[in-house]
Image (tube, helix red, strand yellow):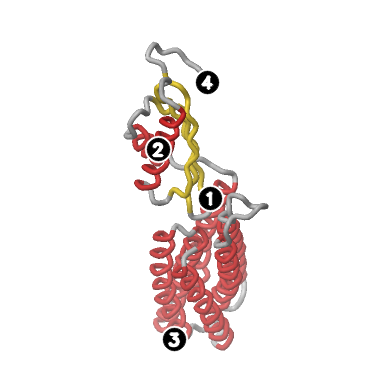
Amino acid sequence: MANKSIFAVWISLISNVLLTILKIVTGLVFNSKVLVADGIHNAGDVVATIAALTSALVSRKPADEDHPYGHGKAEAIASGMVALILIAAALLMVYKSVESFFEPPAHASWIALLAALVSLIWKQALYMYCIRIGRAENSRSLIATAYDHIADVYASAAAFVGIGIALIGDHYHIAYTEYGDSAAGIIVSYLVIRLGFKMGKEAIDILMDKNVTNEQLAQLSSIIYSVPNVKRVDSIRARELGNAIIVDVKVSVPNQLTVKQGHDVSREVKKTIMQRMKLVGDVMVHLNPWYEDGEEEE
């Protein structure tokens, strides 16, 4: 992971610590259950961000004798941990929201509303910052951190709307509006759980060496066919390893080529793929002989 990504994770960690303190203190002082629940969610984010930072540092370690393919999958592990924390935090928010329906409603506070608004704006800015750098660096852990921020945006939006509805209802004496934050919390928790499952599935796919998308495979095939002397693409396999894609291809070349000529074709295939697809970190090429009369030989 590049230095920009490391810096972005540090920014996220410091922000999450400050927002956790802001929400929990404000929620306790002004008796806002949705803010306390959101603060607990943020406390989970602190753990998730530490996991992202740790994995980022591990993934930067070069390949060694025990890990010849490097340490890139550390980021997928961190992404999976963030997904689990998101789901756990969302389930806690559901519990707190449902619990509040059976308790006397608390009076809404303008200070609590302001705290929710500050969190919403702050988290939206962090999401835009982290997702931009994460995609540019193809950093799974930073992208997971960005998704965590957008989940917090949902939670803070729910808190803002719920507290706002309670304030309006209190001012105009509208029945049941004091439970607006609880209802909003349940809806947003569902969205966060869906996001967590999506992130978890993506992390598992990487750890299980799932093939890249059909579009990426088609792009690889097109690039390989552009190399002179490649007569046929016999197979393509490609998987994500950290922030890079590892490609394994079998191609057929004219059977009369010398060993050196075949080696040159293999080298050209690798060089062309890595030039045209910047995410590719390594290419392994296996050559098969190709015959004019269609005879096959493996």
Which residue, given by chain and number where applicable, does mark 3 sit on?
110
Which residue, given by chain and number where applicable, does mark 2 sit on?
269
Q: Are marks 2 and 4 in contact (CB under 8 Å)?
A: no
Which residue, given by chain and number where applicable, does mark 4 sit on?
298
Who is closer to the viewer here, 176 or 220?
A: 220
Who is closer to the viewer here, 274 or 215?
A: 274
Which kind of residue does numbered mark 4 sit on?
Glu
Q: In the image, which is nearer the foreground, mark 3 or mark 1?
A: 1
Residue 289, position as x, y percentages in the image:
45, 22
Q: In the image, which is nearer the foreground, mark 1 or mark 2?
A: 2
Residue depicted at x 49% and y 73%: 12
Neighbours of disc 2 within 10 Å: few (<14), some (14-19), many (20+): many
Q: Secondary structure at mark 4?
A: loop
Neighbours of disc 3 within 10 Å: few (<14), some (14-19), many (20+): few
Asked if residue 9 shows in the view, the reply is yes
Q: CA distance from mark 3 to mark 2?
A: 63 Å
Which kind of residue does numbered mark 2 sit on?
Val
Q: Are marks 4 and 1 in contact (CB under 8 Å)?
A: no
Q: In the image, which is nearer the foreground, mark 4 or mark 1?
A: 4
Q: CA distance from mark 1 to mark 2?
A: 20 Å
Which residue, given by chain and number where applicable, does mark 1 sit on?
241
Quarter location, residue 258: top left
Asked if residue 180 shows in the view, the reply is no
Residue 57, position as x, y percentages in the image:
57, 66
Residue depicted at x 56% and y 53%: 200
N-terminal of the two: label 3 or label 1? 3
Which kind of residue does numbered mark 3 sit on?
Trp
